[in-house]
Amino acid sequence: MTDKQHQSYRYDALAELARTMPYEPSSTQLVHGWRRIQATGVGKARRMSPARWLATLGVAACVAAIMVIRPWQRHPEILSYVVDSGVRGPAGEVTAGDVAHAKLAFSDDTEFVLAPHARATVGALTANEPHVSLDDGRTEVHVRHRDGARWLVSAGPFVVSVTGTSFALAWTGGDRFDIHMHSGTVTVKGPVIEDGR
């Protein structure tokens, strides 16, 4: 709506109000009303003061910054998973059967395939640092790379930090830790390799 259209709309609204009044205003009341309308500046173009322009510009800059930055902000989300051919316990533990592998498929396309008799526990499932513990046995791990995220896979006292790779991991209840890389790299920390290798 242009300024002229807006001004005309205001005058039409005032005229309609005058027509629908229950009594006829006197000429003195009309003149007095007209002067009050002119004093308020209805119909006149108003200039914004420099301070108001700066405030408006500041608000616009803040809104623009939010619109630009917002898409890059990551909100922590919780990953989900399903277990195929395994037994899922109430506290996140998963056990493979006697002859079948158990597959854990996560919502970020990461997969753990537990060998028969293997046991694992699914811990924290935050999007940036999910955690799975291999309690006993062997697992094949395929982690899809995501910016700003890393998986933590523990086996006994060892912790494997993963950002996107494929490897096999074995832990036999306290005496043997074995990792075999298929692709990518990982960092392992544990009792004899504290600095992470």
Image (spheres, helix red, strand yellow):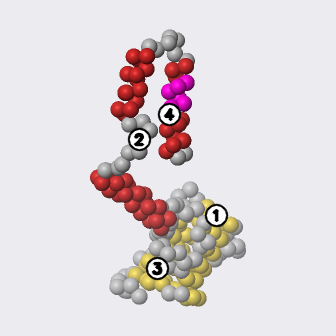
| Screen quadrant of the C terminus | bottom left
Q: Residue at x 55, y 69 (%)?
A: 120
Q: Identify residue type, mark 4.
A: Arg
Label 3 belongs to which residue?
160
Label 2 belongs to which residue?
44
- Dot 4 crowding, Cα within 10 Å, few <14, some 14–19, many 20+: some
* Magenta part, dominant SS: helix
Residue 16: where, in percent of width, then height? 55, 24
Which comes before the other along the chain, label 1 or label 3? 1
Of the pair 136 and 23, the residue shown nearer to us = 23
Question: Label 4, label 3: how many angstroms apart (C-alpha)?
Answer: 72 Å
Above or below, comparing residue 178 to residue 121 in the picture: below
Which comes before the other along the chain, label 1 or label 4? 4
Of the pair 25 and 137, the residue shown nearer to us = 25
| Screen quadrant of the N terminus | top right
Residue 21 vs residue 104: left or right?
left
Q: Residue furthest top?
A: 23
Which comes before the other along the chain, label 3 or label 2? 2
Residue 162: where, in percent of width, then height? 49, 79
Q: Which residues are magenta?
A: 11-16
Q: Identify residue type, mark 1.
A: Val
Label 4 belongs to which residue?
10
Of the pair 30 and 49, the residue shown nearer to us = 30
Question: Label 4, label 2: how many angstroms apart (C-alpha)?
Answer: 12 Å
User: Given this view, does label 1 or label 4 mark the residue nearer the observer?
Assistant: 4
